[in-house]
Each structure stands twice: as structure tokens, then as C-alpha cells.
Image (cartoon, rainbow, N blue to C red):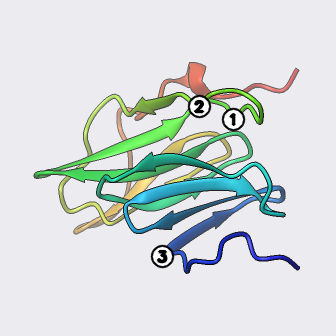
Amino acid sequence: MRRVDSRVARETAVTASRVAYRLGDSIVMSQVDGNRRRILVRGLPVFSVVITRYRVGWLQRIGHRTLALMTDRINPSGSVTIRRGTHDLPASTQSAAADDSRIVEYLGSTGIKRAAPPLFPSTFVVRPD
């Protein structure tokens, strides 16, 4: 099996066909075979990478706030749009968890919490045809 990247990732998230990983202050996504690699964000304090079938998400600390960010549906040949969650998470947030389409839970100083109200609207969810 070929290496996806020569550098060691600090975090990884994997689906059957894609991998997202954190290299320093960057989030990189590629196909599992290493093709179609693209940098989603660079030079920001990012952590807790998550991936779903269609999206990549992560947390970003800005001052005393923690932001949740996710891409729109990943289009292999098109541009990537990044959306910010509807509200900030507590500064103590350490990691995030996604369901099949969006970030829904986070781990803070008081344990695992469901993001309420939802960070991303229900229209963000991909419905099968």
C-alpha cells in the first residue's frame, strides 16, 4: 500500500474511500490511495478532524471560543465551501463527533454533550434519492 503523505499526521479520520488528516495547522483531505489531495485549511489552530461520507469537519480555537467548521458536500473536481456552525462551542471543548452528515456532539470539561441547538441545519443533511 502506498503512503498517503510522507509526513506524520497528528490526527486522522477515515471513510471507505477518503482520509482527512491534520498536519500542524492544516487539514488535508485525499482519497485513500493518495490521489486528489487538497488542503482544506492552512495556518489556523485546528483540531479534532471528523469525516463523513460527503463532508470533512474540524474544530478551531479562536481566543476563548471554539468554532465548529464543516465543508459542504465534497465534489472531487470542484471547489470546497467551508461553513461555520451556527454557534460557538465552549472554550473547554476538546473534540467533536459526527453522525453520517454533520458534527452533532462534542467533549468538554463536563463530558460529552449534544450540540443544542444543532450546529448545522437539517438542510445540511444529504438525503438519499
Q: Find residue 50 and report its image quarter.
A: bottom right
Q: Which mark is residue 87?
A: none
State the image coordinates of residue 118 (x, y, percent, origin top left).
42, 33
Front residue of 127/42: it is 42
Name the residue type under label 2: Val
Residue 64 in picture, x, y percent from top left? 11, 52
Q: Earlier in the sequence, mark 3 or mark 1?
A: 3
Q: Are marks 2 and 1 in contact (CB under 8 Å)?
A: yes
- The residue tagged 3 is 10
Disc 3 to disc 1, how far (Cα)? Answer: 22 Å
Q: Give 50 or 115, whichever is nearer the viewer.
A: 50
User: How many C-alpha atoms fall within 10 Å of the one at disc 3: few (<14), some, or many (≥20)?
Assistant: few
Is residue 96 at all visible to an observer of this figure? no
Identify the element where label 3 is drawn: loop
Q: Is residue 125 toward the left or the right of residue 107 in the image?
A: right
Among numbered discs 2 and 3, the one appearing first in the sequence:
3
